[in-house]
Amino acid sequence: MKIRNKLRHKLLGNLPKALLGVTLLCLLASTYFFSLWWKACQLNIAYENKSLLKQTLKNDEYLKAYSVGYLLASQNKPIEAQKAFNIAEVSLNPELRARAKYGIANVHFEGAMAASDVEKGGSHRRAVERVLLAREAYKGALRLKPDMYDARYNLELIDRLSPEKRTEGYENSPDGTIGLQPYQQNGTALMKDNTRRGLP
């Protein structure tokens, strides 16, 4: 009985210190999460007014780099956008890495479509190179985030629009002319020509 009373008195005596310690831990945690919230708010404001583009970008600011890349891509600055996406791509956050790869793929996709316009100075070879880069980036995004349907859709789309696909589906006819294969004569390519299309 005496031992129990001693333990009880000891616990009651240490209770204020324990409560003080818990309070300090809660205060530190609150301060930390408030700082994260404040940084996120400042990032959103800088993104909205585009002042983010004027700020110095560090190699460990992955979310900021992704935001900068997105803004630069929307302003049709693919080279600068890709550099920013490359920083975000090495983030430890798989969601952010997938988004960065998706952004890189979109930059290559748009570059491939622009390069395929020979009349405006494009070239078939350059377009094919950008198509290959876009495919790999889309596949990389899907490996990290298989349910990223935007990436899957774009991978399917670029596979159908790519320059080397434009000549597929054609065959020599008996009369010496070149025409579409029978199952593609309705103007659409069926999925059976590549059953793994869209998969990483």
Image (cartoon, rainbow, N blue to C red):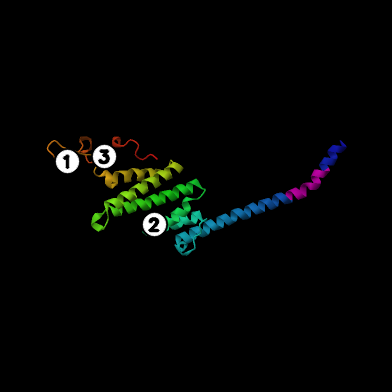
**Side of 52 where 117 appears, left or right:** left
Which of the 4 quarters of the picture holds residue 194?
Answer: top left
Q: Nearer the viewer, residue 59 or 53?
A: 59
Query: Residue 30's x, y, as percent?
Result: 63, 53
Magenta stretch contains residue 16: yes
Q: Nearer the viewer, residue 53 or 166?
A: 166
Look at mark 3 in the image and give the residue it sits on: 189
Q: Which residues are magenta?
A: 9-19
Look at mark 2 in the image and give the residue it sits on: 73
Mark 1, Cα crowd under 10 Å, few <14 / some 14-19 / many 20+, is: few
Tag 3: amino acid: Ala
Tag 2: amino acid: Ala
x 59%, y 53%: residue: 33
User: Looking at the figure, which quarter contains the C terminus?
Assistant: top left
User: Looking at the figure, which quarter contains the N terminus?
Assistant: top right
The dominant secondary structure in magenta is helix
Look at mark 1 in the image and give the residue it sits on: 178
Mark 2 vs mark 3, CA separation in Å: 31 Å
Mark 2, Cα crowd under 10 Å, few <14 / some 14-19 / many 20+, is: many
**Side of 58 where 190 appears, left or right:** left
Which of the 4 quarters of the picture holds residue 153?
Answer: top left
Nearest to N terminus: mark 1 or mark 3: 1
Nearest to N terminus: mark 2 or mark 3: 2
Query: Residue 195's x, y, as percent?
Result: 33, 35
Nearest to N terminus: mark 2 or mark 1: 2
Magenta stretch contains residue 111: no
x 51%, y 48%: residue: 93
**Tag in front: 2 or 1:** 1
Residue sitting at the far right: 2
Tag 1: amino acid: Ile
Mark 2 vs mark 1, CA separation in Å: 40 Å
